[in-house]
Amino acid sequence: MTFPEPPFLPADHDDEQQRALAAPLLARFAARLADAVPVDALWVHGSLACGDYRHGRSDLDLVAVLPAAPGGPVRERLAALHRELGAREPGAAKLHCSYLPRQELGDPAAAHFTFAQGEPMERPVTVIARRELLDAGTVLAGERPDALLPPVSDAALHAHLRADLRDYWYPVTARPEPWRRDIWVDFGPVTAVRATVALREGRLITKREAIARLPALDAPPGLAEDIAARRYGVPPVLTPEERAQRAEQARLFTRLLIERALG
């Protein structure tokens, strides 16, 4: 089903221009990474690969395939590389990379060394990330995703999405306090819409398409415009009362979308 784009979304997508702005940083990171550790492949997923990347606002989501799991010294080198780039280039703070050992390519539940949000952590390369890589992943170095990653079936994708909605997002909608932050207002409804479309239509949609669908799903008045302004334009200035009202609307609307999706 095709939805007309509402007037609060910018008419000019300029995806290619936005990607071009990220290209120099990606090239520098790829070169520096190859100097620091052996790399079998380096891939991009998320909005930069799948569409609707907004330079300076979107994350740069990368996966590096390594010959073996990185030990302590290698992790220290990788963390130092990220921190050095982040100190020199403001955009590098949004560059997140998971380091996937070649022997664990087939396990979407395994947690891997990742540098994201300015710190090292352990997290998996999820079923969604793998599906993005297989459908639209960009190769910065080495082999293609479909040459190394096993296929992700619709059944596996649906199971992951339903578990994420049920076990993570739905409990969050029972807690009013997180929704006073913009990040939850932006991610909650959009995540629920994207999951709904994937469950019903078997495809992953961009954040832009999810935002465009919000009015047709009876989103509270002004919510879609509020989310779009932060992603594409100038964020609105809200009074404490407006922020509290918006938080409650976003929370309850996200909860309703999840209930509909889980059926």
Image (cartoon, helix red, strand yellow):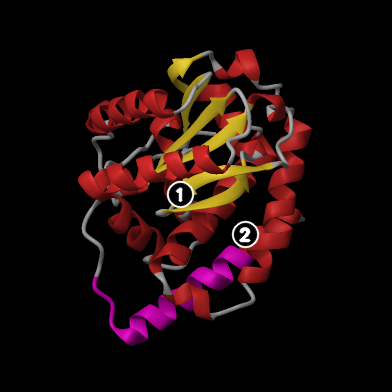
Q: Is residue 252 magenta?
A: yes
Location of residue 88 in the rendering, given as x and y in whole percent from the top left corner: 21, 45
Q: Is residue 240 magenta?
A: yes
| Vertical relation: 150 (above or below) 259 | above
Q: Residue at x 59, y 39 (%)?
A: 71
Q: Nearer the viewer, mark 1 or mark 2?
A: 1
Q: 25 or 9: nearer the eye?
A: 25
User: Which comes sooner in the sequence, label 1 or label 2?
Assistant: 1
The residue sitting at the bottom extreme is 241
Circle 2 SS class: helix
Q: Which residue is mark 2?
A: 257
- Left or right, 101 with reference to 114: right
Question: What is the number of the mark on residue 215?
Answer: none
- Left or right, 132 with reference to 89: right
Q: At label 2, which amino acid type do we have? A: Leu
Q: Which residue is mark 1?
A: 116
The answer to whether any part of residue 44 appears in the image is yes
Location of residue 78 in the rendering, given as x and y in whole percent from the top left corner: 44, 39
Rendering quarter of residue 19? top left
Could you tell me if the residues under marks 1 and 2 are in contact, i.e. CB atoms within 8 Å? no
Q: For mark 2, does the 10 Å Cα neighbourhood hold few (<14), some (14 to 19), or many (20 or more) residues?
A: many
Q: For mark 1, does the 10 Å Cα neighbourhood hold few (<14), some (14 to 19), or many (20 or more) residues?
A: many
Q: Main secondary structure of the magenta part?
A: helix
Circle 1 SS class: strand
The answer to whether any part of residue 59 appears in the image is no
| Vertical relation: 45 (above or below) 139 | below
Location of residue 180 in the rendering, given as x and y in whole percent from the top left corner: 43, 76
- Left or right, 199 with reference to 85: right
User: In the rendered structure, which segment of residues is drawn in magenta?
Assistant: 237-255
Q: Residue at x 64, y 40 (%)?
A: 126
Image quadrant containing the N terminus: top right
| Vertical relation: 230 (above or below) 45 | below
